[in-house]
């Protein structure tokens, strides 16, 4: 497991010894640990951290940060590149559709300096879900708009409807539909011990994918964005973790930012991003806080159909975190994930994430 490097190197600690939930209990017990910490005298930014598909996004975000722009402008400009990319079939235009062949997007944004957030879920026909999420934050008194309401809101702000399903994504969906079995997302009655329902759908065709991008700007402002077409071939209306603030994204300007990719259902039941930020507040490094989130998901997954013979989750979830001092880290349940980092001195690079298994 490689040690992520940042402007300030994260001290290496064995995860098995990390405090995990104990640290949170300690933080709860100590009221001062929950108070916003003083802002650094000298802002250590800019830094950008993104999921592994975010190399170009991180570079674009850094370009804006180096011009002195706000971190939210930077991360949205970065993820727009991926929302535009027909070859990334997990985000925006070219994203894989739901089980009826319709692309439905989820996105969230958070702006640390003003403590605001916005999100859209199950948004159809508008590729820039991240920009619509920002408008929900800036031009409504709400935080989350879904489905038809989100589309109407986007159109009111001048977004044009377009077909987001590319031929490549449609053909992948068609292959999936043609090979459907009785092992899809529609589960028959089952118990905690049932093994042969769900999750056995052809996994090669059935995948997750998302971009999360977090940044620290030159003014010490932290912001983040998570945008996705979500789980491929989902039940229409399914909402993952990406647009749920606290689960797929959380930013606290006094502490740090965190976001996720991977099996949203597991993360929705753990609200990991807010937990990661709180673990960082209580003193954990970004990497250790991400590992704590992985451990908590492993502990909370009890349904046998989701576990392998050794009791480990069969799915993956990955986390990315950045603190206000510019330290960063990432972790996944399963080995092999990498995340993108740009600290401004060189091109974006991929860093190995820490892992549980
Ligand atoms: N977390 C996203 C979701 O569950 C998908 C992903 O990141 O792969 O919708």
Image: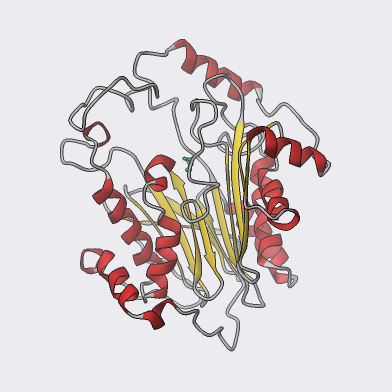
Of 333 and 252, nearer the camera is 252
Q: Can residue 20 be seen here?
A: no
Of 76 and 108, nearer the camera is 108
Q: Is residue 251 left or right of residue 30?
A: right
| Residue 306 sits in quarter | top left
Kindly identify the residue that appears in the image at 27 percent across and 41 percent down.
313
Kindly identify the residue that appears in the image at 50 percent across and 79 percent down.
36
Q: Can residue 266 be seen here?
A: yes
Give x and y (percent) for residue 327: 47, 72
Q: In the figure, 175 relative to 16: above or below?
A: above
| Residue 165 sits in quarter | top right
- Label count reads 0
Q: Is residue 75 left or right of residue 52?
A: right
Q: How is the image coloured?
A: secondary structure
Kindly identify the residue that appears in the image at 43 percent across and 55 percent down.
319
Of 129 and 189, nearer the camera is 189
Which residue is outermost to the bottom? 41
Give x and y (percent) for residue 149: 69, 37
Kindly identify the residue that appears in the image at 46 percent across and 37 percent down.
208
Q: In the figure, 106 relative to 109: above or below?
A: above
| Residue 274 sits in quarter | bottom left
Give x and y (percent) for residue 173: 53, 20
Q: In the figure, 185 relative to 115: above or below?
A: above
Give x and y (percent) for residue 275: 40, 62
Which quadrant of the rendered structure holds the N terminus?
Answer: bottom left
Of 94 and 136, nearer the camera is 136
Which residue is outermost to the top? 178
Which residue is outermost to the front? 141
């Amino acid at each position: 497991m490689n040690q992520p490097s940042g402007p300030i190197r994260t001290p290496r600690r064995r995860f098995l010894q990390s405090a995990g939930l104990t640290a949170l209990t300690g933080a709860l017990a100590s009221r001062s640990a929950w108070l916003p910490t003083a802002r650094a005298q000298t802002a250590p930014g800019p830094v950008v951290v993104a999921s592994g598909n975010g190399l170009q996004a991180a570079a674009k975000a850094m370009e804006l940060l180096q011009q002195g722009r706000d971190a939210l402008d930077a991360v949205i400009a970065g993820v727009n590149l991926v929302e535009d990319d027909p070859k990334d079939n997990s985000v925006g235009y070219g994203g894989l559709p739901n089980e009826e062949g319709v692309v439905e997007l989820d996105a969230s944004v958070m702006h640390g300096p003003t403590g605001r957030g916005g999100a859209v879920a199950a948004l159809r026909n508008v590729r820039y879900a991240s920009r619509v999420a920002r408008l929900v934050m800036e031009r409504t008194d709400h935080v989350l708009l879904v489905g038809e309401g989100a589309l109407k809101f986007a159109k009111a702000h001048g977004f044009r409807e377009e077909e987001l399903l590319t031929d490549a994504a449609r053909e992948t969906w068609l292959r999936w539909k043609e090979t459907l079995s009785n092992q899809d997302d529609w589960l028959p009655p089952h118990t905690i011990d049932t093994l042969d329902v769900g999750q056995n759908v052809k996994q090669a065709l059935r995948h997750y994918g998302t971009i999360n991008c977090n940044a620290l700007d030159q003014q010490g402002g932290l912001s983040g964005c998570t945008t996705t077409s979500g789980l491929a071939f989902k039940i229409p209306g399914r909402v993952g973790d990406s647009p749920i603030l606290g689960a797929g994204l959380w930013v606290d300007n006094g502490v740090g930012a965190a976001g996720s990719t991977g099996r949203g259902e597991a993360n929705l039941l753990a609200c990991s991003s807010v937990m990661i930020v709180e673990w960082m507040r209580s003193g954990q490094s970004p990497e250790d806080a991400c590992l704590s989130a992985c451990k908590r998901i492993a502990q909370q997954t009890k349904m046998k159909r989701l576990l392998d013979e050794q009791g480990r989750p069969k799915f993956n979830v990955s986390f990315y975190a950045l603190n206000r001092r510019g330290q960063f880290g990432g972790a996944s349940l399963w080995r092999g994930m990498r995340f993108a980092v740009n600290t401004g001195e060189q091109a974006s690079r991929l860093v190995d994430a820490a892992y549980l298994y």
